[in-house]
């Protein structure tokens, strides 16, 4: 097991109908900016519940943060923060609203060009000041409610950033708020969580027994409840399990002390930026093909996952790996998520543009060993057609 620091200061307030606790969680004297997305929180009453729970405070609203939040929109919120002297941010929404709020929290204290914070991860990671923020989660997928990272769509690409200062102070995680999600967003949540676990698991053995078995537990749970929670959208316990898997899948716990990959995400972000495909769907396209191309370096962990999670134990190693990749692809498809570029109208003629974007963003040595060069990314994309 490798050396690691583990730090996660976010308080999770989990369960149904706990809005009344917002009053003591949000500082009494704060001037609060409540941020949200395209309107689902208005339509389904969540925003009203948040506002009702915060009486006797100065509160402003900022709506319209897009899915895959746009830099230009977030910088408008930064203007509001500065002009109004806001001192607490409350995100109400899914990963996009929470990520956007994290960016605003950092950018509000940054005097240079806001794009620097996306252009150079080290600038962002070293910022010493950010506005405090918290979240009311309405979509379980990204883990953003309990982590230090975010992803923003900008003129220079869809790019990630991170800083300990943007761990939410608390997140209200009420699984029943996700009951109103369309089926495809629930399926996205299952797949995004599954792939987050895989990015921290499907590498090479590193004696991380706790990390491996915790990851395998999350993966098994997702396979068990994935379809069921889509089919039974108001079953609280099914949804509660999905939500908790999503939070624990990307809060630092299972990735501590073990090698991590993240190539599927990096390539996936280019697909979202170029073609507007939902984040989770890009992952379902890339990961099976990536495993196929990288099957030698991932061999031991592929076989371990096959045995411990999928019960695939017979046949030659090559046969088992074929079965493991196919079974995983079928799991995604069974949730209604298509796993081929061609399913989204993307053909071989567009691969060059994806590779050019990867090159522009210095994504030329991806994976747990930096072995995924542009040439290997090309093979992965060709295999994903
Ligand atoms: O905008 P509104 O109207 O609110 O609608 C949203 C949006 O259209 C809707 N929605 C959210 N909660 C709802 C709901 N509709 C009905 N009922 C509800 N309760 O769902 C749509 C998608 O929302 P979004 O926030 O975009 O989804 P998600 O949570 O999947 O977030 C995706 C973003 O997070 C980034 C992705 O790249 C993408 O930009 N990620 C963030 C990570 C992190 N911070 O650690 C890691 C991830 O790998 C990921 O990259
Ligand atoms: Zn993701």
Image (cartoon, grey):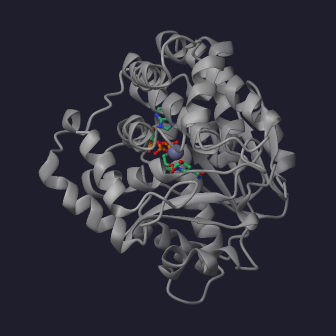
**Up-down: is 57 above or below 331?**
below
Name the residue nearer the viewer: 55 or 141: 141
Q: Residue at 84%, 56% (x, y): give it.
A: 7
Q: Is residue 266 left or right of residue 208?
A: left
- Residue at the extreme bottom of the image, as rendered: 112
Residue 91 % position (x, y): 62, 52
Name the residue nearer the viewer: 345 or 34: 345
Name the residue nearer the viewer: 324 or 193: 324
Residue 19 % position (x, y): 75, 35
Q: Is residue 311 left or right of residue 364?
A: right
Residue 238 % position (x, y): 63, 14
Q: Is residue 82 left or right of residue 344?
A: right
Q: Is residue 71 shown to the viewer in this render?
A: yes
Residue 341 % position (x, y): 25, 39
**Up-down: is 79 above or below 246?**
below
Location of residue 184 by image quarter: top left
Q: Residue at 63%, 26% (x, y): give it.
A: 304
- Residue at the extreme front of the image, as rendered: 316
Location of residue 240 by image quarter: top right
Number of numbered callouts drawn: 0
**Up-down: is 210 above or below 98?**
above
Q: Is residue 140 shown to the viewer in this render?
A: no
Q: Residue at 56%, 31% (x, y): give it.
A: 302
**Up-down: is 156 above or below 36?**
below
Name the residue nearer the viewer: 64 or 190: 190
Quadrant containing the C terminus in the rendered view: top left
Q: Residue at 21%, 32% (x, y): give it.
A: 343
């Amino acid at each position: 097991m490798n050396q690691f620091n583990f730090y996660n200061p976010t308080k999770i307030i989990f369960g149904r109908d706990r809005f009344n606790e917002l009053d003591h969680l949000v500082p009494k004297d704060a001037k609060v900016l409540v941020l949200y997305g395209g309107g689902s929180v208005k339509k389904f009453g969540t925003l009203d519940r948040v506002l009702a729970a915060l009486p006797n405070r100065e509160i402003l609203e900022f709506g319209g943060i897009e899915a895959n939040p746009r830099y230009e929109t977030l910088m408008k919120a930064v203007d509001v923060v500065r002009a109004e002297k806001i001192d607490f941010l409350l995100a109400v929404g899914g990963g996009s609203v929470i990520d956007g709020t994290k960016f605003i929290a950092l950018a509000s204290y940054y005097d240079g060009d806001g794009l620097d914070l996306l252009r150079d991860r080290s600038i962002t990671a070293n910022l010493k000041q950010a506005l405090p923020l918290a979240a009311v989660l309405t979509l379980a997928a990204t883990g953003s409610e309990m982590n230090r990272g975010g992803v923003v769509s900008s003129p220079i690409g869809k790019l990630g950033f991170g800083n300990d200062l943007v761990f939410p102070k608390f997140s209200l995680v009420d699984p029943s708020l996700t009951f109103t999600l369309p089926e495809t967003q629930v399926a996205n949540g299952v797949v995004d969580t599954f792939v987050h676990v895989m990015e921290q698991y499907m590498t090479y053995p590193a004696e991380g027994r706790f990390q491996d078995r915790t990851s395998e537990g999350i993966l098994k749970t997702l396979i068990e409840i994935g379809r069921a929670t889509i089919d039974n959208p108001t079953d609280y316990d099914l949804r509660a399990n999905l939500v908790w898997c999503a939070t624990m899948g990307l809060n630092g716990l299972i990735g501590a002390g073990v090698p991590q990959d993240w190539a599927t995400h990096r390539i996936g972000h280019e697909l979202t930026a170029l073609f507007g495909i939902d984040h989770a769907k890009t992952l379902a396209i890339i990961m099976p093909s990536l495993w196929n191309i990288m099957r030698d370096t991932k061999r031991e962990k592929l076989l371990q996952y096959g045995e411990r999670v999928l019960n695939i134990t017979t046949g030659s190693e090559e046969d088992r790996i074929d079965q493991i990749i196919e079974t995983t692809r079928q799991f995604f498809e069974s949730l209604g998520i298509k796993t081929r570029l061609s399913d989204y109208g993307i053909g071989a003629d567009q691969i060059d543009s994806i590779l050019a974007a990867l090159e522009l963003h210095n994504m030329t040595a991806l994976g747990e060993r930096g072995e995924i060069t542009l040439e290997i990314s090309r093979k992965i994309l060709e295999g994903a057609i």
